[in-house]
């Protein structure tokens, strides 16, 4: 774990992103019509503790060794970059497979829970691929389509976490519910991935995003700096 003195400048840079952001997270979906609650306003003086004290979305998990599974990694299939962390069974500290429980990374309020999701279809995939070829790879609805069935949690201060590619949402999780850190909110699947159609069962993993304002944590930073920020993110608040 890198020392906090090395990480604080990176956190300050990321905090500046969400301090300047509009304080609202939006996204459209071709597979669900969620009811969302706007995140709480970002304070004028960023509280750097918002970037600490999170837990991994799978119990016993850790950051993957490969930077290809981290934010900013290229995603050739849609002509864009990765906006979160992928937790795969082959590159993690715990076993991860279809049905593995996904937990809330921190206390918060549920703003999206895709109970009514329908699986990605070949027609939807073909239409998305056509739009990607036309330069629309980063349109919000395209990104949302490929995230599949999701749960979003608002943690306040402009911070929202997204849990994607789930196979199912926990039955007791509803929009507006308050959840505690470690509560089971969903289960691992491959929803939204092209492989869910072309090669089912090969891309079962949770995708975790942390949104700060209207962007993702670590956007545009080099891999080493991104990794340092996320190592700090999953550091307990009690650690000096």
Image (cartoon, rainbow, N blue to C red):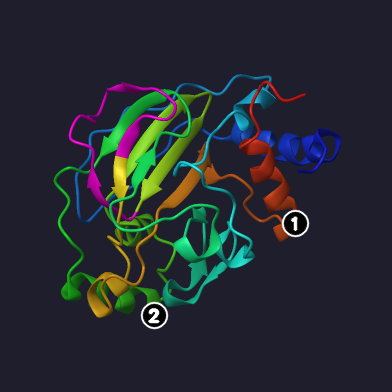
Placement of the C terminus among the 4 image quadrants: top right
**Distance Cα–Cα, label 2 vs label 1:** 31 Å
Reply yes or no: does residue 170 show up in magenta.
Answer: yes
Helix or strand or loop: what does disc 2 sit on? Answer: helix
Determine which residue is flagged by label 2.
133
Quadrant in which residue 119 is drawn: bottom left
Q: Position of residue 154 (x, y in %)?
A: 42, 29
Disc 2: CA contacts within 10 A as few (<14), some (14-19) or many (>=20): few
Determine which residue is flagged by label 1.
224
Q: Is residue 175 visible?
A: yes
**What range of the chain is rendered magenta?**
165-185
Q: Position of residue 101 (x, y in %)?
A: 34, 44
Mark 2 or mark 1, whichever is nearer to me:
1
Which residue occupies 68% across, 51% down?
226
Instruction: Say left or right for 230 vs 59.
Output: right
Reply yes or no: does residue 176 show up in magenta.
Answer: yes
Helix or strand or loop: what does disc 1 sit on? Answer: helix
Quadrant in which residue 192 is drawn: bottom left
Q: Is residue 91 above or below residue 40?
A: below
Q: Is residue 222 visible?
A: no
Q: Is residue 99 above or below residue 190?
A: above
Instruction: Say left or right for 102 vs 1.
Output: left
Quadrant in which residue 230 is drawn: top right
Q: Which label sits on residue 191? A: none
């Amino acid at each position: 774990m890198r020392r906090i003195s090395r990480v604080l400048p990176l956190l300050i840079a990321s905090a500046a992103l969400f301090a300047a952001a509009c304080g609202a997270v939006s996204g459209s979906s071709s597979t669900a019509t969620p009811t969302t609650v706007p995140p709480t306003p970002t304070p004028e003086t960023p509280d750097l503790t918002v970037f600490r004290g999170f837990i991994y979305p799978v119990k016993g998990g850790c950051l993957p060794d490969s930077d290809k599974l981290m934010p900013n990694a290229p995603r050739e299939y849609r002509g864009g970059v990765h906006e979160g962390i992928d937790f795969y069974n082959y590159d993690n500290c715990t076993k991860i497979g279809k049905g593995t429980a996904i937990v809330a990374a921190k206390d918060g309020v549920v703003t999206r829970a895709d109970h009514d999701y329908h699986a990605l279809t070949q027609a939807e995939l073909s239409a998305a691929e056509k739009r990607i070829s036309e330069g629309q790879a980063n349109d919000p609805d395209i990104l949302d389509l490929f995230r599949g069935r999701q749960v979003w949690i608002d943690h306040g201060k402009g911070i929202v976490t997204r849990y994607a590619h789930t196979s199912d949402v926990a039955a007791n999780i509803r929009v507006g519910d308050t959840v505690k850190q470690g509560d089971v909110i969903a289960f691992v699947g491959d929803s939204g991935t092209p492989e869910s159609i072309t090669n089912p069962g090969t891309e079962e993993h949770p995708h975790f995003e942390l949104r700060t304002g209207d962007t993702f944590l670590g956007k545009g930073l080099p891999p080493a700096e991104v990794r340092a920020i996320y190592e700090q993110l999953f550091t307990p608040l009690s650690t000096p």
